[in-house]
Image (cartoon, rainbow, N blue to C red):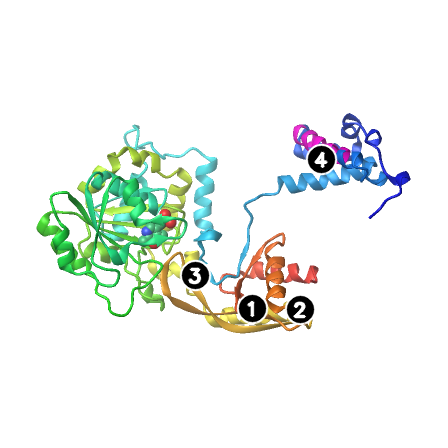
Amino acid sequence: MTLSTSSLAQPADLPALDKLLGQSELASAIQHYGLTLVTQQLRLLLAQLRSRAVAQQLPTADVEPAAIIQQLKQQLTTVTASRLKSVINLTGTVLHTNLGRALLPDSAVAAVTQVLTQPTNLEFDLTTGKRGDRDSLIEDLICELTGAEAATVVNNNAAAVLLMLNALASQQEVIVSRGELVEIGGSFRIPDIMSSAGSTLVEVGTTNRTHYADYQRAINEHTAMLMKVHCSNYAVVGFTKETTLNELVKLGQQHQIPVTVDLGSGTLVDLAEWGLPHEPTVKETLTAGADLVTFSGDKLLGGPQAGFIVGRKSLIDIIKKHPLKRALRVGKLTMAALESILALYRSPELLPERLTTLGLLTRAKSDIQQQAEQLAPSLQQTLGSDYQVASAPMHSQIGSGAMPIDSLPSYGLIVHYLGSAKASRAIMELEQWLRTQATPIIGRLHKNALYLDCRCLTSEQAHLLKATWSSHPL
Ligand SMILES: *Cc1c(COP(=O)(O)O)cnc(C)c1O
């Protein structure tokens, strides 16, 4: 755009900062955001306008006080908008690590709100009036639900494994099968955790086959632990041999070496009860003889981010006294949410109604299908005849590495592009458009089509979806 010089503003035409701040149109913004932030943002805006004026690129209309104030208000809305936003998860992955994993029910949220706004007995023993131990608030409950003798909680499962190794196997050897040297997304790798803990990883067997004798041969006077890691996010299939936990326990007992299991997802109930694939429970693992078990709070358990170490009391006592335990301990928000979530497990038959994650995992396909079919016409109308929107069956994933090869029958929308432009490009643009809405809508690209799985869609969000795409025709 070329502008005639007469319609261009000069730097001297810019109104003074104080004059702008005194305008009555800014009074409500100053009351809302405070004078400091408004002044800072106005300075930034005026500096930008000045550079454009110097570059002979500023139309005179843009230096009108009303125009500047309008721009300033927009700028204030943008800079104060929350970076952590709610999104609509149509990826089909229920426990999506990048979207914050487990969602908590209102009961847990209420417990968190209470400890955030009111003093609490976090580390205060109400019986003795002396200092208490925060773990004790939920230790009984964890033991009741898992059959463990003792338990401790830290910030996440990576921290649980790190702490366990540091406390029990620092400067010593830990034997792990080559088939179980897991990498979990976000750079948690068993070999790296071992070296951070100062433990020497002794790999035994091969990727697909590890025998009892492989473990047996590797044991020496430096061995501090036999460790099994649950293959959360992959499966070894075909010509395979895994030494069972029972066998390893026998070996550990013979040599008086603790056997530990990193279960990863770790559920407290048998999910097969609700037609989901069976995942070893914490209780089963302890019953099979594991001395310690580690698992996450925000995967299948359905709680807040946390990591548990449960099992033999003599080992837990050592772990609790380690200095890293203090560094990795959980805050009161986590404690409150955990207590509330764990308590739900006392009534297992009511879990699908009360535990959000299990509700999503067990949601009936017919219900999801009905929702998808209701949504399809409105999206089709928004996108027009260049696109084809079909409601169709698809498969959801549990996510977070839980049961990587099992998938859940679900329903959703599949969008194909039929127009004359490049299909892959058009579909990518559609995905981006949905992702950049005020409430971002996150789908999944697959073979030049956009998949929108409705499993995790609440009815409120479904209204929001419809409103979003009907108010913004592409
Ligand atoms: C997920 C997982 C971890 C890490 O747990 P976070 O809670 O994400 O720290 C560790 N080990 C296994 C086997 C896992 O599946």
Residue occupied by mark 2:
421
Q: Which residues are magenta?
A: 36-50
> Three-letter amino acid code at disc 4?
Ala
Q: Earlier in the sequence, mark 3 or mark 4?
A: 4
The answer to whether mark 2 and mark 1 are in CB contact below 8 A is no
> Quick one: label 2, few (<14), some, or many (20+) residues within 10 Å?
few
Quadrant in which residue 277 is drawn: bottom left
Residue occupied by mark 1:
448
Q: Is residue 38 magenta?
A: yes
Q: Is residue 102 left or right of residue 152?
A: right
Q: Is residue 456 left or right of residue 196?
A: right
Residue occupied by mark 3:
359
Q: Is residue 408 magenta?
A: no
Residue occupied by mark 4:
29
Q: Is residue 72 left or right of residue 105?
A: right
Q: Distance between the Cα atoms at labels 1 and 3? A: 31 Å
Quarter of the figure that contains the C terminus: bottom right
Q: Earlier in the sequence, mark 2 or mark 1?
A: 2
Label 1 sits on a secondary structure element that is loop
Q: Distance between the Cα atoms at labels 2 and 3? A: 41 Å
The x and y percentages for residue 340 are 38, 48
Q: Earlier in the sequence, mark 4 or mark 2?
A: 4
